Image (cartoon, helix red, strand yellow):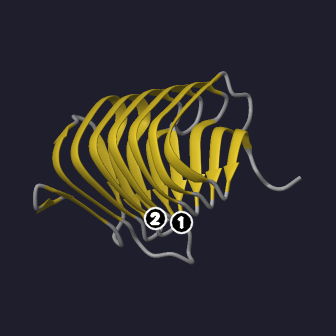
Amino acid sequence: EFGLTGCLNFYKTQFNDVMIDAKNGICEDTVNIVNSDGYINTLKVQNGYADGIDIDFSRLKINFIQVKNSSNDCFDVSSGIYEIIDFLAVNCGDKGISVGEKSILSAKNVSVDSALLAVSSKDQSSLFMDSGEFVNVSNCFESAQKKQEFGGARIKLNEVNCDAGNLIDKNSSVVINNYEL
């Protein structure tokens, strides 16, 4: 009725060193956070019907994220500013991390095991990572303009371990250790 798509929804919430653990969500998003800010210590999701975690219009710092077994994206953010220290995703049906619609996401350590696409930055978004470890993925990176009302996207990282391909459109970029792909 109110457009919230999660099994567990947070709307206009101020987080202060919280821990969230959600399992077996049968909604579009197992955890959905909208228009919120603050600090989340630990955010864990297991066995999501579609997206594990979906966050929109927020400003959050998250110490540790773990998502296991989501049939769509493990972690999806849009229109906000996000900082992650450690991120682990296992068995994502589509993307490990999806960053879209003018978002900025900074992450220190990112690990994705089993996804079609490890990380994606779309529609004027920026994804900055210190290190990435991606295994059992069809593509390491996607950096692209998907919607006509936005421009290209960018991904910049220092160190990555991934043997798969990349999807980069003419309006977007991926830079690894100061080398543009």
N-terminal label among 2 and 1: 1
Label 2–label 1 contact, CB within 8 A: yes
Q: For the residue labelled by badge 2, is the local secondary structure a helix, a strand or a loop?
A: loop
Residue highlighted by disc 1: 79
Picture residue at 33% right of the left edge, 48% below the top: 141
At label 1, counting other C-alpha atoms closer than 10 Å, the crowd grade (few under 14, some 14-19, many 20 or more) is: some
Of 96 and 43, nearer the camera is 43
Residue at the extreme right of the image, as rendered: 1
Quadrant hosting residue 173: bottom left
- Expressed as whole percent of the image width and height from the top left, the position of residue 94 reads 51, 37
Residue type at mark 1 is Ser
The relative height of residue 33 versus residue 73 in the rendered view (above or below) is below
User: Left or right: where does residue 162 sit relative to residue 30?
Assistant: left
The label on residue 103 is 2
- Expressed as whole percent of the image width and height from the top left, the position of residue 129 reads 26, 51
Residue type at mark 2 is Ser
User: Left or right: where does residue 98 sit relative to residue 163?
Assistant: right
- Expressed as whole percent of the image width and height from the top left, the position of residue 131 reads 20, 43
User: Left or right: where does residue 149 sit relative to residue 171?
Assistant: right
